[in-house]
Image: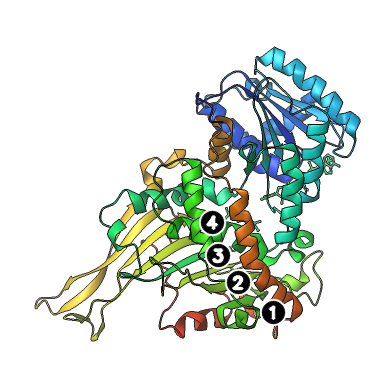
Amino acid sequence: MTTTTNNPKSIIVIFGATGDLANRKLFPSIYRLYRNGKLSENFAVVGVARRPLTNEEFRNNVMKSVEQFQEDDIDHESFASHFYYNPFDATDLEHYQKLNSFLLELDDQYQTEGNRIFYLAMAPNFFGTIASNLKSEGLTSTNGWTRLVIEKPFGNNFETAKALNDQIREAFDEDQIYRIDHYLGKEMVQNIEVIRFANALFEPLWNNQYISNIQITSSEVLGVEDRGRYYESSGALRDMFQNHMLQMLALLAMEPPIKLTPDEIRSEKVKALRALRPVNEDEVDDYFVRGQYDRGIINDEEQIAYRESNAVDENSNTETFVAGKLLIDNFRWAGVPFYIRTGKRMEKKSTEIVIQFKDLPMNLYYDQGENIYPNLLVIHIQPYEGITLHLNAKKGDYGTTSTPIMLNYDNTQKDKMNTPEAYEVLLHDCMRGDSTNFTHWDEVALSWKFVDIISNHWESKAAKQFPNYESGSNGPKDSDALLEKDGYQWWSVLPDNNE
Ligand SMILES: NC(=O)C1=CN([C@@H]2O[C@H](COP(=O)(O)OP(=O)(O)OC[C@H]3O[C@@H](n4cnc5c(N)ncnc54)[C@H](OP(=O)(O)O)[C@@H]3O)[C@@H](O)[C@H]2O)C=CC1
Ligand SMILES: O=C1O[C@H](COP(=O)(O)O)[C@@H](O)[C@H](O)[C@H]1O
């Protein structure tokens, strides 16, 4: 159900309100919605978690997490007065009944018409239980709408994801379920469709006749930090590749939807994911490279190896880097490799998509005796947000030499202070009932099925040489070799002053 108003009345219940995600991402996002006039005065936020906090203590936490916006002309206390705390154990049914009575009171107080968002910002093993309990204890039966927002990871493989989905679907319909993939809330990820479908220049070239390969990179400088326990059961393949990276691939590869509705877009993304050529177990090593970071130096500081991190096994076989070559078996993409890589503790924080166009049939111009550069379209997702187009132009007096040039659109300069944070965008979408930028079960299922073959193979066969890349590098050498054997290289190009 799409809500007609842009600032609908509702109560947001945050499960795990004392946790990291709530404090670092959710409270600031709700604040920005409030500041930007995207919340009506008829809203309340109820935080639930086990530790015994008073409303006042909770509001102080909320104010601390929005301290960064001190300069705004907004009364932080008035903002925080919309927040309430309810001590709560997710495994205790009585607590759900008490919570329900409290929500009914708030409904009256804030005139929220029974509209409720349940945001599960808790460990994934609680997702199914909370969904079932919300239903059995009557919290989903209101005279308004109810929506469930689920954080990642959604399962650990296809089987566990399906079991979780089945359990949640007993309590909520698919159109009430908002599975978060925060990359889909990023401004430049949302721009992929616009660049493709609003430009006569690109749309006709977006296929195997003109594109030689597509590269999607998401590198992080951060290591596993204090998330070792979670990461040991996940690794880069499940943590980043199965969700964020495959979602970006689907947006790049899908056919134009007939309308910009959630169902039409989802249906095209699903078709693209269905066309992904599955990798057989005996081909995994030809198409995928795994890596694990060693010690190294970043910004003059020594970094510890992954295996030395808290809660990580000293002989861990978990990958912190993955690179893969994916093929899409349909008319548009036959023969075009999509190269994807993501890793932690790499040289720089950067997410970018490079579309490399095919070379001309012959060269009339040379760049210092070398063949001219291929044309590239780069969609810079973060931290630099923009689009660059890499062309060749005349150099020197006689017009036989060319030089690479770059046209640059800087998306951050236009409205520097207002680039919406991913969670802010997604929360607002959920309030409006727009599920376009959330992942549907069909997409989750297909992504897991693709990834399971690779993870099963890696789990059955320890990596030959882990760790295999230094902190602060660009990942293992085999990742470069993956492209070199096809005659390509990873591109990493940023406008000046954005390195
Ligand atoms: N942190 C991040 O940056 C990101 C997190 N996520 C996902 O978000 C979710 C939350 O992560 P994060 O905030 O880091 O986790 P935290 O461990 O920081 O927070 C967990 C929260 O759950 C509460 N909790 C634990 N057990 C219970 C219980 N039995 N009943 C009620 N509340 C309980 C804790 O509070 P108390 O101890 O008081 O009960 C705490 O508020 C996870 O699914 C994670 O994968 C996804 C992307 C990024
Ligand atoms: O989902 C996750 O994403 C972050 C990276 O997100 P970004 O917005 O900073 O690019 C990653 O660090 C984390 O391991 C993963 O769970």
Category of crowding for the residue at label 3, using alpha-carbon neighbours closer than 10 angstroms: few (below 14), some (14–19), many (at least 20) = many
For the residues carrying marks 2 and 4, which lies nearer the camera in this image?
Answer: 4
Category of crowding for the residue at label 1, using alpha-carbon neighbours closer than 10 angstroms: few (below 14), some (14–19), many (at least 20) = many
Q: Which residue is mark 1?
A: 467
Q: Is mark 2 within 8 Å of ligand 2?
A: no
Separation of disc 3 and disc 1 at Cα?
17 Å
Indicate whether 247 appears above or below 90.
below
Separation of disc 3 and disc 4 at Cα?
16 Å
Q: Are marks 2 and 3 in contact (CB under 8 Å)?
A: no
Residue type, numbered disc 4: Gln
140 or 329: which is nearer to us? 329
Q: In the drawing, what numbered circle is on residue 247?
A: 4
Q: Could you tell me which residue is drawn at 47 percent across and 47 percent down?
A: 265
Q: Which residue is mark 2?
A: 322
Q: Are marks 3 and 1 in contact (CB under 8 Å)?
A: no
Q: Which residue is mark 3?
A: 219
Percent position of residue 378, x then y:
38, 62
Query: Where does the C terminus fall, quadrant-wise?
Result: bottom left
Q: Could you tell me which residue is drawn at 88 percent across and 39 percent down?
A: 91
Separation of disc 1 and disc 4 at Cα?
28 Å
Indicate whether 186 appears above or below 371.
above
Sequence-earlier tag: 3 or 1: 3
**Residue 361 as seen in the image, left or right of residue 257:** left
Return the residue found at the far left: 398
Q: Could you tell me which residue is drawn at 14 percent across and 75 percent down?
A: 396
SS at mark 2 in the image: strand
Sequence-earlier tag: 2 or 3: 3
Percent position of residue 457, x then y:
70, 77
Sequence-earlier tag: 3 or 4: 3
Indicate whether 18 appears above or below 345.
above
For the residues carrying marks 3 and 4, which lies nearer the camera in this image?
Answer: 4
Percent position of residue 407, x then y:
28, 59
